[in-house]
Structures are given as structure tokens and as C-alpha cells.
Image (cartoon, rainbow, N blue to C red):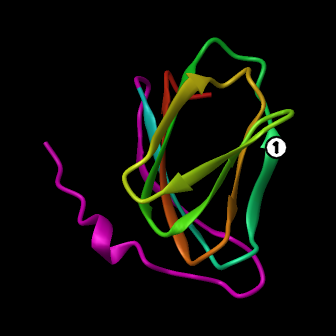
Amino acid sequence: MKIVDLDKLTGYNDKKMNRELVHDNYTFRILNFNFEPGQELPIHSHPADSELALQVLEGEGFFLGEDEEIPAKAGDLLIGPVSEPHGVRATTRMRVLVTIAPPI
């Protein structure tokens, strides 16, 4: 087993979102994204048969879809297939934990 202190994954970058690999193996991958206000993970999709979970750890912004913006705040969790267009935009300093299973 492994314990990860998510509170230590707090690196931010004024020029672009900060991405850190938290865990990676053949069953699932976990990434931590830190955004400054206005930064985003552009809408994209992957041609894979995997699931995705986006969990807001801190801050506020939007989950982005092909034709929608869903308000997102700390504690919110979005789950869906990685083949569905998805993205994130921060309106405040924002931390998002992303889980992909199986990894792509």
C-alpha cells in the first residue's frame, strides 16, 4: 500500500496549469492538476474504453463538455467515459484530482 499526502501537491505555475503524476499502473492512473484563475485543461477526448473521474479538491471553476459548462466547486466529482469530450476551467485557484481506469 501507499499513502499520498495530496496537500503536498500544491505547485502552481503562472503561465500554465501544473500537472503531477500521483500514481500509475496497469489498472488506473491518478493525476493532480493545479490551476490559477483563468487557466484550463482544454476540451478533448480519447479514443479508448476507459472511465474518467474529475474530483475538485479545492477552488471553483467549470467542468467543460462539448456544448456545456457545468459549475464545479470543492467536493464535486464528475464521472464519465474518456471518449466523451471533457475539460476544466478555473475561476479561482483550483486543484483537481483525475483518475483514469484503465489508464490510456
Q: Residue at x 75, y 62 (%)?
A: 40
Residue that protrudes farthest toward the bottom in the picture: 14
Residue that protrudes farthest toward the right in the picture: 67
Q: Nearer the viewer, residue 63 or 54?
A: 63
The quadrant the C terminus occupies is top right
Q: Residue at x 40, y 23 (%)?
A: 27
Kind of element beneath mark 1: strand
The answer to whether 54 is drawn above or below residue 40 in the figure is: above
Q: Which amino acid, by three-letter code, is at mark 1?
A: Ile
Q: Which residue is mark 1?
A: 43
Q: Residue at x 58, y 18 (%)?
A: 50
Residue that protrudes farthest toward the top in the picture: 49
In the picture, measured across the screen, residue 32 lies left or right of residue 81, that is: left
Total numbered badges shown on the rendered structure: 1
Q: Nearer the viewer, residue 42 or 64?
A: 64
| Stretch in magenta | 1-27
Residue that protrudes farthest toward the front in the picture: 71
The quadrant the N terminus occupies is top left
Where in the figure is residue 88, as x and y percent of width and height?
68, 53
In reply to whether residue 23 is colored magenta, the answer given is yes
In the picture, measured across the screen, residue 11 lies left or right of residue 64, that is: left
Where in the figure is residue 34, as x and y percent of width and height?
55, 69
In reply to whether residue 50 is colored magenta, the answer given is no
Where in the figure is residue 79, as x and y percent of width and height?
51, 28
